[in-house]
Image: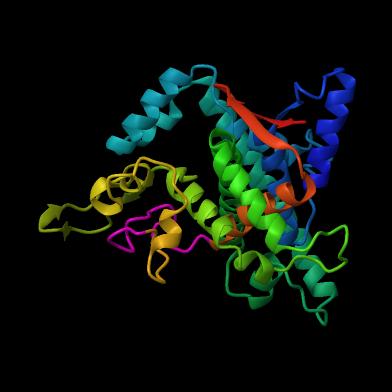
């Protein structure tokens, strides 16, 4: 994964005749999204989408249409805010270019998911004696899910499985660029605790990564500070109460990690600071020194192990392969650009 990005950085530097002191600019958001799409395809579907080698393929273009910022961004932000506050379904049907492109992208993804399921079903049938390890094969083999539900699950799995991971990895790079002292300390831990891949043929294992406390702390802090999904909406399906307040059926409930994860009541006076050390000081508990296990809503009280593992692996590879290079970046309105400063 990193090899492909590194090759692009080097080639861009040569092509643009960039001096070593200037570094090379690469849109990391795009590259990481394509990488994670391929990874989730192989792990979840047993299929390589080739988004990394072919950025113009149909699935990658479909996600571009769904997730890219609209031209009329201010208007769309107003509409999305209204949808979160008031359940007005017709807002997404307003004849705007972004709505049209989003619908087209979603239809393309649904069509490709259907084709993928049909191909996988045939593959499972023809190789019934061979145990398939991907999630889709297991779901088909169980014969417990209808085709329509399976398509819905594949679409959810593809979107949630790659977009949130790439977003988390992008923010990890941004955080290290903004805090070079943390970047240096993390590089020092990785290089002092893990054997060099050049001098040692043994692959790095999950157990190796798990015994790096500062790496774990940095990744946990990235996911707290930059929740990949900053706001999630739920609709109440029956009359109920929350903390004694009546909540009628149909009420929109907003879960906002971007607010709760910064609560000084839950995290202390330094809640607004990016400080990985908070995850090391707690006495054996992994709640970052907060007052509650519900203080971190990044995964809606789930463990979010997939995002954490990918961020761990990304940072380990970066600092293993680039001994003397520092990460420097700047944010743009439409994308993140990161620099390997030579």
* 156 is higher (above) or lower (below) than 133: above
Q: Residue 62: horizontal and vertical position, in percent?
A: 67, 36
Viewed as shown, does residue 17 lie left or right of 124?
right
Q: Quadrant of residue 294?
A: bottom left
Towards the viewer: 258 or 76:
258
Residue 128 in magenta stretch: no
Viewed as shown, does residue 40 lie left or right of 287?
right
Towards the viewer: 223 or 268:
268
Towards the viewer: 72 or 110:
72
- Which residue is drawn at the image coordinates 45% and 61% (left, top)? 280
* 26 is higher (above) or lower (below) than 106: above
- Which residue is drawn at the image coordinates 21% and 53% (left, top)? 249
- Which residue is drawn at the image coordinates 79% and 37% (left, top)? 57
**The C terminus lies in which quarter of the figure?**
top right
Q: Magenta stretch: give its range.
A: 289-304
Q: Assign the magenta stretch its main secondary structure.
A: loop
Q: Is residue 14 visible?
A: yes
Q: Residue 19: horizontal and vertical position, in percent?
A: 82, 20
């Amino acid at each position: 994964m990193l090899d492909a990005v590194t090759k692009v950085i080097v080639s861009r530097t040569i092509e643009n005749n960039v001096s070593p002191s200037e570094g090379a600019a690469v849109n990391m958001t795009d590259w990481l999204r394509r990488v994670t799409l391929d990874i989730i395809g192989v792990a979840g579907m047993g299929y390589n989408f080739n988004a990394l080698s072919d950025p113009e393929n149909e699935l990658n273009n479909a996600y571009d249409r769904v997730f890219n910022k609209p031209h009329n961004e201010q208007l769309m932000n107003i509409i999305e805010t209204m949808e979160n506050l008031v359940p007005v379904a017709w807002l997404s049907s307003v004849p705007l270019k972004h709505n049209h492109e989003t619908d087209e992208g979603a239809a393309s993804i649904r069509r490709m998911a259907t084709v993928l399921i049909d191909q996988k079903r045939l593959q499972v049938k023809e190789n019934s004696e061979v145990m398939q390890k991907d999630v889709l094969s297991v779901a088909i083999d169980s014969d417990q899910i209808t085709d329509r539900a399976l398509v819905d699950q594949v679409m959810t799995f593809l979107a949630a499985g790659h977009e949130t991971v790439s977003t988390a990895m992008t923010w990890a790079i941004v955080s290290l660029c903004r805090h070079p002292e943390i970047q240096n300390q993390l590089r020092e831990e990785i290089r002092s605790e893990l054997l060099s891949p050049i001098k040692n043929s043994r692959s790095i294992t999950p157990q190796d990564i798990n015994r790096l406390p500062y790496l774990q702390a940095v990744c946990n802090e990235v996911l707290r500070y930059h929740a990949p999904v900053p706001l999630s909406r739920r609709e109440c399906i029956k009359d109920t109460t929350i903390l004694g307040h009546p909540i009628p059926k149909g009420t929109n409930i907003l879960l906002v990690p971007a607010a709760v994860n910064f609560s000084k009541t839950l995290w202390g006076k330094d809640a607004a600071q990016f400080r990985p050390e908070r995850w090391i000081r707690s006495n054996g508990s992994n709640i970052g020194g907060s007052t509650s296990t519900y203080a971190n809503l990044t995964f809606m009280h789930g463990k979010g192990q997939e995002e954490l593992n990918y961020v761990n692996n990304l940072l380990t590879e970066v600092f293993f392969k680039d001994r003397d290079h520092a990460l420097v970046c700047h944010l743009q309105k439409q994308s993140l650009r990161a620099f390997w400063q030579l």
